[in-house]
Amino acid sequence: MMTVYLSHGLESGPGALKTQALKGVAEKLDDCEPVVMDYRGIAAPQLRLQHLLGVLAERGDDPARCVLAGSSLGGWLSAAVSAQQPVLGCFLLAPALGLDDYPETSPTIQARHTHIIHGWRDEVIAPEPVIERARLQRLSLRMVDDDHRLHASLDTILCDFERFLRQCGAPTQYA
């Protein structure tokens, strides 16, 4: 069983459009259990990170069987957790990289599979730090003609997410 942790952005919540749409994709797959995180009332990125790490520890999920997916601050959280404990996958939407007020501006993503989707017209998170992180680690990156919310790219995101989860769940050819 693969556990898929879904993390929403700073001013969003667990019922947000993208979070619920990603949950729907994970629910369709036999070997996936989605866990929708709720960070409402926790403003500081470091405190949200501690909360996510606490839930991972409390549930006892094997990081090697976990996919972390998130948007904006949720994307940063997913990347930050993977920097501390290697995970199966990171699926990052407009991840909040390159922001000075975050504890780590560009965490090294340690995931067997990583895919990033970012908008060229993102007015909140500049594309450059995201592109640079992808370049440095040679990570899969899809740039789309969209803004920070990525709502115009939802169909693309959901197709990529389903393909990503299937890739994460496929038997490893080279162990």
Image (cartoon, grey):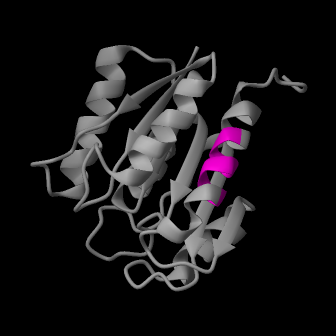
Residue sitting at x 65%, y 53%: 115
Question: Which stretch appears magenta?
Answer: 156-162
Residue sitting at x 84%, y 22%: 175
Residue sitting at x 90%, y 25%: 173
Please give left or right for residue 122 compared with residue 113 in the image: left
The image quadrant that residue 172 belongs to is top right
How many marks the image carries: the answer is 0
Q: Nearer the viewer, residue 95 or 27?
A: 27
Quarter of the picture containing the N terminus is top right
**Taking the image as drawn, is residue 85 in sight?**
no
Relative image position of residue 49 (x, y in whole percent): 29, 45
Please give left or right for residue 35 compared with residue 29 in the image: left
Residue sitting at x 76%, y 35%: 167
Q: Residue furthest left?
A: 41
User: Would you say residue 39 sits in the magenta stretch?
Assistant: no
The image quadrant that residue 12 belongs to is bottom left
Relative image position of residue 155 (x, y in whole percent): 62, 57
Q: Nearer the viewer, residue 129 or 42?
A: 42
Relative image position of residue 141 (x, y in whole percent): 69, 64
Above or below, 98 against 140 in this view is: below
| Magenta highlight: main SS | helix
Above or below, 45 against 121 in this view is: above
User: Would you say residue 160 sits in the magenta stretch?
Assistant: yes
Above or below, 16 against 147 in this view is: above
Relative image position of residue 124 (x, y in whole percent): 37, 80
Above or below, 94 against 8 in this view is: below
The image quadrant that residue 99 belongs to is bottom left
**Taking the image as drawn, is residue 107 in sight?**
yes
